[in-house]
Image (spheres, helix red, strand yellow):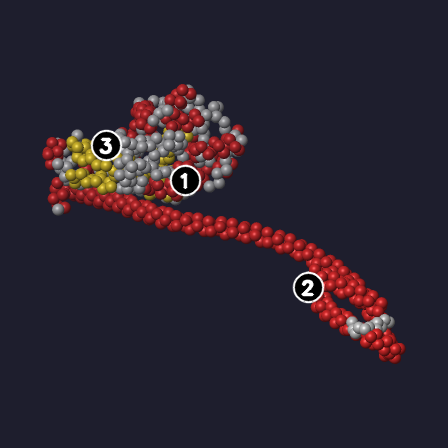
């Protein structure tokens, strides 16, 4: 690594790093904490987020370095003040849209904050993207803005010098291809990261992760793009999984990942990924230092006075709903059937906006049924693609039998797949309609309105 | 028949022939060659007849009529005798008549020769003229033929051009017809496309309006949620403050 001081981005032909990250990592993903589904805590996609979530105390001030679209937006459930910085203005904007209190576009080696501002400075998948020549400056800035008793936590991509080629061993074309995959220009081994942090913090701890558990897509990416050796029949199996099967696989992987953390098991060094905590004060437990997940689950308290169900933590959207998308507005796509469970003492009307993007809906109208507590409310055929406001009046007899708990089921007679099967995104969701602005009106409110 | 009568007959014939020949000659030079040859033939006949007459005059120019009497018998003889006695007495005026006959005969012979020479010359000139006219005619005919050929070629060319022009005009007419059809079709198609586009735009506008309504609805709901949460937070703070005040008062007591 004699030439580590060279700018690897330049050597790889990336002249505008901000633009590189904008085109690669900006998305319309909805990561707003208000839309987070409790079940997704098991999704391996949120495993790193959950590690930070369980190590941050409620009400703290958190700085997210390289915030991207806002993967740590879930921390808002703990009432933290969440600040994000990123090289790309588009990423900053996306994070702000996803609920960050404050975001800025800046280089990480020159943070525009006063000394000792944050309780936590965290990053996920960022340190591996910082060139060797800039890393120390970044850690120096982290140390500066962190409070004396603050903790810095990082999820860092790693390498294995024995198993993989160093940057100096790559020819320009190989280097270009390697950097183009994810923008990794600062990969080091786990202990190298640890040693680097020790130069800035008195206490450093790290745990190699993702040796056992990877998402189905990550397995394929590591095999196809980085050349990691997995059993071929296993990879073929993963390639054949449907969206729902991949989600089940990822949930299982995430569950095991979480249990490894809960049991405080130490995994062997793997050259893939490391969780690292550092502070100038003695560190607490590596996992679950401030575990408090109450805010993730439904709470009847939160439904009071809030009549919109979309962002309400008391409402459970089952797995028939896909994660929310920014259409705009933010709406949830559903498969052929989906349920919403919500408590309500009195219910007069349910209203919602829905749309479908099915291209042939004019020729073949889509049959949509609404069922409340197993009793049909209404059925109609959707024959156009625009938004439709639906008001469902709830019979008093049904309310009286409901005992305060309701389950609204929506069924569609068919689904479609917007993306072709060979699409690189592997987004093969079978969707029917998208729903938003799901509101309930109780009898009293209706009487007042009238 | 006396000599004077014969000469008068000859003169009248020559004059009449000459009169008849002159217009024929004029006609032959101005009209067709067939008329000319007919005139030449009449002239030759006249000259032949003149030569015959000259043989008569050549034979009779010095002869005097014989002495005769219509009476018979003695009277007749006496008369013949007297006439025979008077015959030498008439010599003085018959002699002059013989001289005159001789002079007329010679003059006519000379005239005949001159006329024959002129006729030959005329025939030669006529032949020459005819030849020249024929040559000129042939040359003119050749010119006419070549000009006719040229004209035919030009005519053919013109006809070809006309045909081509007709074809072009017909093609242009067809094209114009097609263009008119296409224009009509295009116009109707454009009109239908515009109507479809307008319909699509209106539809899209309605969709956008609806989308905007849903977005505003979402914003409105979020705003009301924020207001509720703010109110809830304010009430919680008030409750905490009240608790703090209560605890302070308890401590003061």
The residue where tag 1 is placed is A22
* A225 relative to B178, above or below: above
Residue B228 in which image quadrant: top left
The residue where tag 3 is placed is A411
Residue A364 in which image quadrant: top left
Q: Which residue corresponds to the image point at 42% horizontal and 20% vertical from the top-left?
A: A232
Q: Which residue corresponds to the image point at 33% horizontal and 35% vertical from the top-left?
A: A72
* Furthest-right residue in this view: B88
Q: Nearer the viewer, mark 3 or mark 2?
A: 2
Residue A421 in which image quadrant: top left
Q: Chain of mark 2?
A: B
Are discs 1 and 3 both within one chain?
Answer: yes
Q: Nearer the viewer, mark 1 or mark 3?
A: 3
The residue where tag 2 is placed is B31
Q: Quadrant of the C terminus of chain B?
A: top left
Q: Out of A339 and A364, give the one closest to the viewer.
A: A364
Q: Quadrant of the N terminus of chain B?
A: bottom right
Q: Secondary structure at mark 2?
A: loop
Are discs 3 and 2 both within one chain?
Answer: no
Q: Which residue corresponds to the image point at 50% horizontal and 27% vertical from the top-left?
A: A165
Q: Nearer the viewer, mark 2 or mark 1?
A: 2
Mark 1 or mark 3: name the one nearer the start of the chain. Answer: 1
Q: Secondary structure at mark 3?
A: strand
Q: Out of A141 and A51, give the one closest to the viewer.
A: A51
Image location (x, y in percent) of residue A339: 22, 31
Marks 1/3: CA distance?
38 Å
């Amino acid at each position: 690594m004699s030439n580590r001081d060279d700018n690897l981005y330049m050597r790889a032909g990336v002249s505008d790093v901000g633009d590189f990250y904008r085109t690669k990592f900006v998305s319309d993903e909805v990561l707003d904490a208000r839309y987070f589904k409790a079940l997704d805590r098991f999704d391996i996609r949120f495993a790193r987020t959950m590690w930070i979530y369980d190590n941050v105390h409620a009400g703290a001030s958190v700085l997210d370095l390289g915030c991207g679209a806002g993967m740590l937006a879930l921390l808002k459930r703990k009432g933290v003040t969440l600040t994000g910085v990123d090289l790309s203005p588009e990423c900053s904007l996306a994070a702000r849209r996803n609920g960050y209190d404050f975001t800025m576009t800046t280089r990480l080696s020159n943070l525009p904050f006063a000394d000792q501002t944050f309780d936590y400075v965290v990053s996920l998948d960022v340190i591996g993207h910082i060139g060797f020549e800039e890393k120390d400056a970044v850690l120096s800035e982290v140390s500066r803005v962190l409070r004396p008793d603050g903790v810095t936590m990082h999820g860092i991509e790693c390498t294995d010098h024995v198993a993989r080629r160093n940057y100096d061993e790559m020819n320009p074309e190989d280097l270009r291809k390697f950097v183009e995959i994810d923008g990794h220009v600062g990969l080091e081994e786990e202990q190298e990261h640890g040693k680097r942090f020790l130069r800035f913090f008195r206490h450093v701890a790290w745990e190699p992760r993702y040796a056992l558990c990877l998402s189905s897509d990550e397995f394929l990416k590591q095999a196809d793009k980085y050349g990691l050796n997995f059993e071929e029949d296993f990879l073929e199996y993963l390639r054949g999984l449907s969206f729902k099967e991949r989600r089940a696989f990822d949930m299982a992987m995430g569950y095991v990942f979480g249990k490894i953390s809960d049991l405080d098991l130490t995994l062997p060094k793997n050259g893939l990924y490391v969780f690292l905590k550092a502070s100038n004060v003695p560190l607490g437990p590596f996992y679950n230092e401030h575990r408090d997940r109450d805010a993730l689950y439904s709470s009847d308290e939160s439904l009071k006075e809030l009549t919109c169900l979309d962002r309400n933590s008391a409402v459970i959207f089952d797995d028939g709903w896909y994660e929310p998308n920014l259409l705009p507005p933010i709406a949830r796509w559903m498969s052929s059937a989906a349920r919403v469970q919500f408590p309500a003492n009195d219910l007069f009307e349910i209203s919602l906006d829905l749309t479908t993007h099915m291209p042939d809906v004019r020729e073949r109208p889509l049959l949509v049924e609404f069922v409340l507590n197993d009793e049909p409310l209404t059925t109609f055929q959707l024959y156009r693609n625009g938004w439709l406001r639906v008001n469902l009046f709830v019979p008093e007899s049904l309310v009286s039998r409901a005992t305060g708990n309701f389950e609204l089921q929506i069924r569609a007679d068919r689904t479609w797949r917007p993306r072709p099967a060979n699409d690189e995104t592997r987004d093969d969701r079978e969707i029917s309609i998208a729903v938003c602005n799901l509101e309930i009106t109780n009898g009293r409110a209706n009487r007042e309105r009238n | 028949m006396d000599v004077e009568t014969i000469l008068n007959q000859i003169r009248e014939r020559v004059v009449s022939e000459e009169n008849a020949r002159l217009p024929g000659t004029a006609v032959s030079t101005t009209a067709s060659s067939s008329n000319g040859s007919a005139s030449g033939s009449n002239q030759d006949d006249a000259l032949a007849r003149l030569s015959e007459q000259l043989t008569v005059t050549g034979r009779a120019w010095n002869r005097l009529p014989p002495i005769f009497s219509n009476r018979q018998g003695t009277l007749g003889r006496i008369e013949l005798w007297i006439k025979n006695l008077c015959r030498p007495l008439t010599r003085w005026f018959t002699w002059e008549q013989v001289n005159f006959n001789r002079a007329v005969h010679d003059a006519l012979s000379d005239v005949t020769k001159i006329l024959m020479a002129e006729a030959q010359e005329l025939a030669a000139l006529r032949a020459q003229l005819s030849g020249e006219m024929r040559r000129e005619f042939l040359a003119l005919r050749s010119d006419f033929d070549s000009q006719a050929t040229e004209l035919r070629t030009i005519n053919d060319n013109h006809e070809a051009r006309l045909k081509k022009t007709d074809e072009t005009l017909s093609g242009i007419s067809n094209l114009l017809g097609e263009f008119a059809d296409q224009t009509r079709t295009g116009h109707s198609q454009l009109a239908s496309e515009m109507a479809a586009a307008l319909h699509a735009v209106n539809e899209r506008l309605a969709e956008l309006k609806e989308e905007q309504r849903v977005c505003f609805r979402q914003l409105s709901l979020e705003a009301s949620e924020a207001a509720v949460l703010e109110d809830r937070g304010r009430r919680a703070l008030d409750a905490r403050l009240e608790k703090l005040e209560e605890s302070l008062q308890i401590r003061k007591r």
